[in-house]
Amino acid sequence: MSACCRLWALVALLIAVGCSRDKADGRLVIFAASSLREAFTALGTDFERTHPGVRLVFNFAGTGELHTQLTHGATADVFASADQRHMDELVRAGRVGEPVVFARNEPVLVVSQDAAGTIRGLTDLPRASRIVVGAPEVPIGRYTLQILDRAASHHGGDFRARVEAKIVSRELNVRQVLTKVRLGEAQAGVVYRSDTLGASDLRVLEIPAAINVVAEYPLATVTGTPHPGLAHDWTLLVLSEAGQRGLARAGFSAVQR
Amino acid sequence: MTAQRVALALIGALLVLFLALPIVSLFASASATDVASGLRHPLVWPALRLSLTTTLITLAIVVTLGTPLSWTLSRRQGRFWQALESAIQLPVVIPPAVAGVALLLAFGRRGLFGAVLGGAGWSVTFTTTAVVMAEVFVSAPFFVQAATSAFRRIDPQLVLVSRTFGASPLRVFFRVAVPLAAPGLGAAAAMAWARALGEFGATLMFAGNLPGTTQTLPLAIYTALEADLRAAQAISMALVVVAFSLLWFVRVTLKSSLEVS
């Protein structure tokens, strides 16, 4: 009997610990797109050094997931999105304040080692036997389709159709695209430049600037945050020279202003 | 006495409530028009068809290969067989995405066995076959575990008697063991089928996500979730309805077959 009581006490304790109170004192919660993990984690160390007593809590996930969590009332102070559309929807819903673009991320073509001889640029893409792209529902997939459409004006009207005939999978996130090319399952794919850092087992090819669609990353303060001051400081840090240098090291391109 | 019975029922009700609430919310928060427009979503029907065909093929494979294995496991004792039984349970514990990576490393183009297939100019990744392989990998352990305990519940005397009357081992298996364990085997098959239907992580990793070829219902739900929560909700409801009808059907048939025997 007493063992049973002890078990109940343990369960109650776990529930009490699990349902964290919104005490949030000196705790800044940042929801950020997965691609920002390395850059933001590094900047976070700087931030905590200049703000003693403040602890940063990051939630890195796909922008779509973060959007769903925020729509359903997740507690956060700052939202950094990998795509304008999700941010615009949250602005319209009144969940976040005025967004500011803090980084750009260029899509690049990645080619597996064994296909590097045949595919030397976007023009050669239809010659690949297996192409993996993002699903049209996720940002990288949407950009890829836009790039293929734009390429059509340079490489012939049926360029997109010729590439799409070789697509074997439309992945749900950009890391899955990268993994399939790195493992050689797919010969080519389109990912962000920031994803290719440290991936030595594949060839990274530029997409011509005239054709490329550059992803803009907006950042906004979540409406009703208990820490508007800290959220503002974080925004300033990201936009500062040091912040932009950190983002550049992670493969992002600078924001002209 | 009654008070104790009520207390037990109340404690049980807590769990039912917790399990039911998310499912009820899934249905309650959508209007009829939401569901109708969600079900007209272009992702739904190809995914539903693919899910049904692949899980039925999976079920056939799992039952055909799993039943003899479970019979053997239930009849053996000793360290080796215990270790084997535990090893077969491993896919239940490892996260599905890890299972997907493991399948890639085994059957992928650069995989251990993939190189053999590749030599024959054949690759399984990104095909419907890969979907079935992922489903078999994650669902077979559920079947083997439940079927083995079903066979263990058979009275050993009955097996012994049929052997002394000269029935061959195969005849004992088909005419004595399988009919006696049939209800348990049915429940085991239902559990494996349900697990195959819900399979997501290993499929995404190993088979990819292409509508009509490898995009099963769970993958379609996740794809829709990226763009439109309502559509994802509608497809989820379709999945819940399909799964519930089949599980319920199995339960009812099992019950009637028990009453007949």
Image (cartoon, coloured by chain):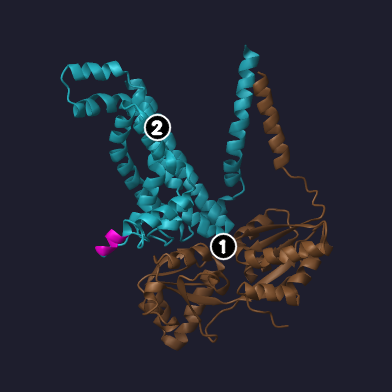
Magenta-colored stretch includes residue A72: no
Q: What predominant SS class does the magenta segment belong to?
A: helix
Q: Which mark is residue B146?
A: 2
The structure residue drawn at horizontal position 39% and vertical position 56%, both measured from the top left corner, is: B105
- Residue B203 position in % (x across, y down): 43, 54
- Identify the chain drawn in cyan: B
Where is residue A124 shown, x and y percent of the image?
Answer: 39, 82
Q: Which residues are magenta?
A: B115-120
Q: Image quadrant for the C terminus of chain B?
A: top left
As drawn, B168 above or below B108: above
| Residue A71 position within the rendered picture, expressed as x and y whole percent measured from the top left | 68, 57
What residue did someone put label 1 on? B227
Q: Mark 1 vs mark 2: tell me if same chain.
A: yes
Whichever of callouts 1 and 2 sits on the residue coming sooner in the sequence is 2
Of B210 and B105, the residue lying toward us: B105
Task: Tell me the chain of label 1.
Answer: B
Which residue does the image show at 38% across and 31% down from the upper left?
A: B82
Image mark 2: chain? B
Horizontal placement of A69 versus B102: left or right? right
